Image: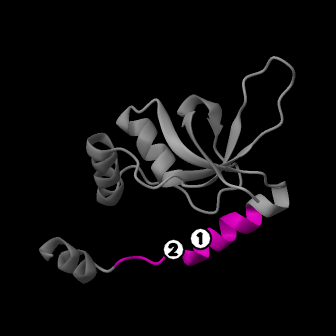
Amino acid sequence: MTDELKRIPLSSIKENPAALRNVNRNTEEFQSLVASIKSRGVTQPILVRELPTTAGEEQQYGLVDGLHRYTGSLDAGLKDIPAFVKNLSDGDALEVQIINNLHKIETKPAEYTKGLMR
């Protein structure tokens, strides 16, 4: 699978109806993400796949990984977002989503503090 990095209009991205996680927009962590995106933009691309289109229809993309960054970008008022585009079947997209969620390790507050101190 070849990754292609693009800037994609947020309006061309469709959320995954079978997303493994959801976004709680009311948390302090999410509001912090939105503030960071407003000031610095999105520094880690999301992962999408092309969705089937009909002739003359604008290309649409399905969100595979990066729901919080995608939603934060919407709330921050961005028009587009950096994204890796992969050619994935439905099954492959689900597998990648599961693997990426397994790889997420929460950072402990003490680790954040040490990073800020540096």
Q: Residue at x 83, y 30 (%)?
A: 53
The N terminus - image quarter: bottom right
Residue at the extreme right: 55
Q: Name the residue tied to disc 1.
A: 101
As helix, strand or loop, the secondary structure at mark 2 comes to: loop
Say above or below: 106 vs 72. below
Mark seen at residue 14 = none
Please state which amino acid type lies under the numbered disc 2. Lys
Please, is residue 109 above or below residue 93 in the view?
Answer: below
Report helix, strand or loop for mark 1. helix
| Depth check, front residue: 54 or 6 | 6
Q: CA distance from mark 2 to mark 1?
A: 5 Å
Q: Whole-percent x and y of residue 81?
A: 49, 40
Residue toward you, 93 or 85 = 85
Q: Is residue 102 magenta?
A: yes
Q: Position of residue 106 (x, y in %)?
A: 41, 76
> In the rendered view, would you say 105 is above or below 40?
below
Residue 97 lies left or right of residue 103; in this view the side is right
Horizontal side of residue 10 vs 106, given as left or right: right
Q: Is residue 107 left or right of residue 69?
A: left
> In the picture, which quadrant includes the C terminus?
bottom left
Q: Hey, which quadrant is residue 52 in on the image? A: top right
Amino acid bearing label 1: Asn
SS assignment for the magenta stretch, majority: helix
- Residue found farthest to the top: 56
The magenta span reads 94-107
- Indicate which disc residue 104 carries: 2
Q: Residue at x 65, y 57 (%)?
A: 19
